């Protein structure tokens, strides 16, 4: 990529919070970035508005929405080509005229286009943690074989990445362990005995971050941190015991690297996703993100504490899954997606999320062939979902 040409960008999951923040950063740098592709799933009016604003070459949607979007684009005189389903996402993510892919589709649905981008050697900005949670070794192999540049966008993993030198070959010799920080969500100080009465709206009321409903619930259960532990294992090639978690309510220290010499390196900033997004877009340079500057003189204090298993039992499933046969983390992710959807629909209670996750993890045991490639992993994902749905039916209120 030459410095004389704008970076051609595809945003997968353009209407979500990460997609929106990405486009906010991009709009601040019209000389550096050109949006050539967008995708959306259910929020088609906002997606149409983004097409009007950025005039991408392609937009990818589910097949059921394609005709209506084509008609709306034609009515506006826009020449944007409408692509359909997984095939459309993969075509856009791997197209030779695309430089960078922001992977912000929530859930296992983002695995195939992430794999396509990796195999095509793109600069891949990974906000879809499930690609690594589900894909693991298979995904990292695609990154290596395709020559892709994988840059983490989760604030915690970006923080770790920012604390490490550019030469990845030196990481193993430098890192003793890493510490992922967690806000603790809206229930970090709530009596665990009262969590059974939690409503979806309460679970989605995150005290620090503005996020979608699914990830907000994951933050409330700390399942998001469990998934991030799995993600960190693959991103930084660490043993599970080298990954630790602390609750840090202020969300100022985004994560830490503890070095072999016991120096602790940390990345600090305001809780604004535009910072890691801007870093991923411009790496190894740094550009204006739009975030506020952190004024350390206004901080009352920074506190840290260990997470407890009574309030956040889901967090500890991460190490259990990593110690089990490969593919077990895909089972955990599938069960959690089904359980959170059922909770948001009012079909099960808040504490039932962990019950479904733990039971599915116990009862769906991957075999050696279940982690053998993307198709096998997605078949395992579906098997776990079917089992989780049956468990949800047994718990439905």
Image (cartoon, helix red, strand yellow):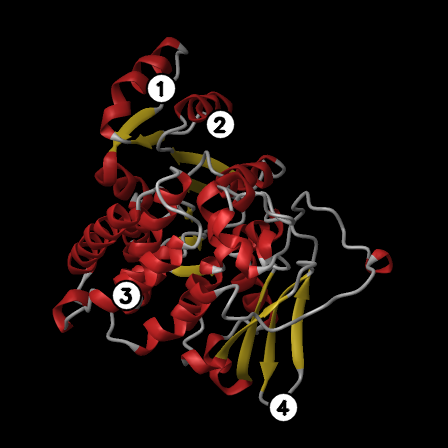
Q: CA distance from mark 2 to mark 4?
A: 48 Å
Q: CA distance from mark 2 to mark 1?
A: 12 Å
Mark 4 = which residue?
Answer: 261
N-terminal-most mark, 2 or 1: 2
Classed neighbour count for the residue bearing mark 2: other residues with Cα under 10 Å, few (<14), some (14–19), many (≥20):
some
Mark 1 = which residue?
Answer: 79
| Tag 3 near tag 1, CB within 8 Å | no
N-terminal-most mark, 3 or 4: 4
| Tag 4 near tag 1, CB within 8 Å | no
Mark 3 = which residue?
Answer: 361
* Element at label 4: loop
Mark 2 = which residue?
Answer: 54
Q: CA distance from mark 2 to mark 3?
A: 43 Å
Horizontal side, residue 341 vs residue 3: left or right: left
Q: What residue do we see at 47% from left, 26% from top?
A: 50
N-terminal-most mark, 4 or 1: 1
Foreground mark, 2 or 3, reads: 3
In the rendering, at what x and y percent does residue 298 appear?
85, 56
Kindly tell me whether residue 146 is visible in this rendering: no
Q: Residue furthest right?
A: 297
Q: What residue do we see at 31% from left, 65% from top?
A: 329
* Element at label 3: helix
Kindly tell me whether residue 319 is visible in this rendering: yes
Q: CA distance from mark 4 to mark 1?
A: 57 Å
Foreground mark, 4 or 1, reads: 4
N-terminal-most mark, 3 or 1: 1
Q: CA distance from mark 3 to mark 1?
A: 47 Å
């Amino acid at each position: 990529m030459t410095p004389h040409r704008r970076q051609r960008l595809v945003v997968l999951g353009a209407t979500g919070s990460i997609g929106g923040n990405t486009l906010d950063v991009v709009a601040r740098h019209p000389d550096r970035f050109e949006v050539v592709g967008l995708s959306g799933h259910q929020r088609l009016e906002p997606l149409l508005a983004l097409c009007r604003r950025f005039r991408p070459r392609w937009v990818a949607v589910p097949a059921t929405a394609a005709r209506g979007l084509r008609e709306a684009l034609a009515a506006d005189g826009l020449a944007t080509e409408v692509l359909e389903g997984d095939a459309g996402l993969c075509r856009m993510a791997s197209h030779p005229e695309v430089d960078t892919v922001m992977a912000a589709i929530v859930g296992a649905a983002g695995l195939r286009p992430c794999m396509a981008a990796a195999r095509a050697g793109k600069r891949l900005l990974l906000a879809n943690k499930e690609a690594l949670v589900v894909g693991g070794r298979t995904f990292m192999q695609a990154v290596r074989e395709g020559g892709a540049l994988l840059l983490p966008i989760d604030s915690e993993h970006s923080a770790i990445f920012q604390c490490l030198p550019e030469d990845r070959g030196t990481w193993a010799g430098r890192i003793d362990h890493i510490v992922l920080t967690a806000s603790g969500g809206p229930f970090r100080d709530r009596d665990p005995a009262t969590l059974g009465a939690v409503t979806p709206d309460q679970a989605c009321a995150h005290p620090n971050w503005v996020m979608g409903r699914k990830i907000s619930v994951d933050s409330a259960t700390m399942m998001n941190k469990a998934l991030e532990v799995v993600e960190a294992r693959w991103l930084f090639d660490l043993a599970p015991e080298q990954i630790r978690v602390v609750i840090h309510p202020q969300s100022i220290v985004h994560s830490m690297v503890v070095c072999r010499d016991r120096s602790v390196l940390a990345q600090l900033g305001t809780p604004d996703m535009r910072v890691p997004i801007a870093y991923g877009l411009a790496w190894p340079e740094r550009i204006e993100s739009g975030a506020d500057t952190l004024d350390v003189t206004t901080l009352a204090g920074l506190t840290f504490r260990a997470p407890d298993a009574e309030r956040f039992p889901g967090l500890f499933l991460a190490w259990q899954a990593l110690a089990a046969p490969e593919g077990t983390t895909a089972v955990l992710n599938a069960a959690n997606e089904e359980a959170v959807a059922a909770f948001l629909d009012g079909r099960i209670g808040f504490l039932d999320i962990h019950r479904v996750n733990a039971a599915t993890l116990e009862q769906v045991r991957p075999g050696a062939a279940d982690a053998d490639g993307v198709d096998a992993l997605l078949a395992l994902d579906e098997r776990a979902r079917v089992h989780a749905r049956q468990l949800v039916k047994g718990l439905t209120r």
